[in-house]
Amino acid sequence: MNVDPTVLARIQFAFTVSFHIIFPTISIGLATFLAIMEGLWLKTKDPLYLQIYRFWLGIFAMAFGVGVVTGIVLSFEFGLGFARFGQMAGPAIGPMIALEVLTSFFLEAGFLGIMLFGLNRVGQKLHFFATCMVALGTLLSASWILSANSWMQTPDGVVVSHGHLVVTDWLKVIVNPSWLYRLPHMLAAAFITGSFLVAGVGAWYLLKGKYEAFGRRTVSIGTAFATVLIAGQVFLGDIVYGKMLEYQPAKMQAAEGFWERQSQSPAPYYWIIVPDQEHQRNRFTVGFPYLGSIWLTHSLHGRVAGLQNTPRDQQPIMGWVFYGFRVMYGTALIMFGLCVASLWLRWQGRLFTARWFLRALVVMTPSGVIATLGGWYVAETGRQPWVIYGILRTADAVSPVPAGAFLATLVAFVCVYTLFISAFLIFAWRMIKRGPETAPAQTEASGSLKYALRPQVMQAPTGNTLAASEK
Amino acid sequence: MGVSTMRKIRGTAFVALMLQGGREPDRIAVGWEVIGANMQRPATLFARILGAVLAALLGTAFFFTIIGVFGLTPAILALVLFIALAAAIFRCPQAEGSG
């Protein structure tokens, strides 16, 4: 077979990690949302909050499960597909992955069962504590993974000795130069994803004229969170952009679509380009005059640095980085616009009655996932040709495995993941169609852990059989 | 009640809300309810288009400022102002029709 194993290994990892990131993004966003909903229910005793909690708990559980399973695959791929990366970077990356397991996975594993099945078995406060611990676990998980990935983007605290990395300063490895900026950016992305998901489903109910109280509350909460978060994300995004320009200029040069060492003045902001990497030029461009100078240099006539500032053998493929960035940024612009529209409609008292807005929310339901995927494509394709920026090239990190083996496993992953995503979408759609009505708006727990551990309660399918009979 | 009167009432209540900083939530809530009742009246198409254009312009101005076009300090101030305005608007009562 003539296909380069490196290309196949990269396609396989790109496919599996792209698939995987959808689910942690949803579960991080939903876990915090669920903790807030349960907290509001405990504070106000409004049963609608509990109904919202119970409804979204099912979808969270599915996203969490698929996220865990597809995440484990990635760890194996490090060893099987990128063994040389594992050999070299293991001393730095390995402990961070292990710490993710020890802190977040153990925390989530300890409390997930109580969160999913304990609402009628344990007391309300203990259950709320479990939900908060699961939410904390998702945040810790994101923190460790972002730390590991940010270290690959901006490595620090190590020296190369005989082809291996030796950690000289653990604090610098964990709190590497880009982690502090990329972590809040990713967490905000996850929360925005959850907010649009919740608001979109609520809007769909309002358009259908079903479960209107539920729909109104979720549209209101979802758009409120999204509005505050998207403004913060725009701010954070600009900070991350500035930092990456400092540490990985090639990535940002590729993201803006300019080849020349200095662009024309004023620089346009390109939305569509047809890049010609070989001849280091664009065959076709569509841009908005002046906007490149204003957005990228914060002046009317500023010039933007192009990819020719980076040696050819260190350049990323411009098309991937450029369109990844446009997908993320374009989606974020639409989200921001929709949030401003939500404020205007709230001001008018028409948030739940403007059908065009509700339709737009339904269309934008998966927008957070799309923007997050776009962002990760910028991060990962923009780091190329390096796997550890400036230290190890991707081509040198791939395992000596025949192309056929990579191709066969890639086909297997595509088949299995197609089943996963189909099952997830079918069951999520069924739950949404069934609606929140099936989610009871009250609990019947006694409040003690001793009660929860009684065999009758443990064996009851929903945990409330005994409680009902005892009453 | 005309659109301009509604705007004046809304503006006055908004200023009151900002000045009181939420210290008297009950009074503010009552104020919003009165405004909300007034808002049930149909606005003219012109007023809606004007409102949409104004909202778009304000949104664009906020976006450009928050993204740092005018520097870091204005960006932080614009972010805080945007969130404060949003938090105030979140309290507006909404019509409950299904659309």
Image: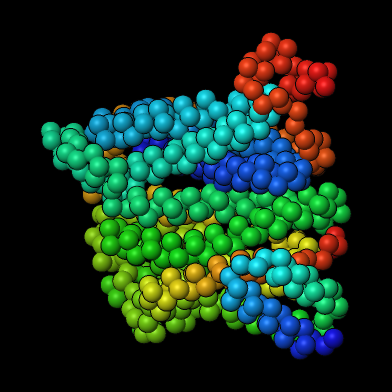
Residue found at x 80% / y 74% = B34
Residue nearer the viewer, A156 or B1: B1
Position of the N terminus of chain A, as image quadrant, is top left
Q: Is residue A221 left or right of residue A72?
A: right
Residue at the far left in the pictured view = A162
Q: Is residue A225 visible?
A: yes
Q: Position of residue A267 (x, y in %)?
A: 40, 79
Q: Position of residue A106 (x, y in %)?
A: 46, 26
Residue found at x 50% / y 54% = A188
Looking at the picture, does residue B5 appear above or below residue A30?
A: below
Q: Is residue A378 left or right of residue B39?
A: left
Residue found at x 64% / y 74% = B17
Q: Is residue B57 left or right of residue B42?
A: left
Residue nearer the viewer, A207 or A416: A207
Q: Is residue B37 left or right of residue A372?
A: right
Looking at the picture, does residue A255 appear above or below residue A14?
A: below
Q: Position of residue A175 (x, y in %)?
A: 29, 46
Residue nearer the viewer, A403 or A30: A30
Looking at the picture, does residue A191 appear above or below residue B37?
A: above
Residue nearer the viewer, A247 or A173: A173
Q: Position of residue A342 (x, y in %)?
A: 68, 67
Q: Quadrant of residue A104?
A: top left
Colour setting: rainbow
Residue found at x 35% / y 52% = A180
Q: Quadrant of residue A113?
A: top right
Residue at the far top in the pictured view = A455
Position of the C terminus of chain A, as image quadrant, is top right
**Number of callouts:** 0
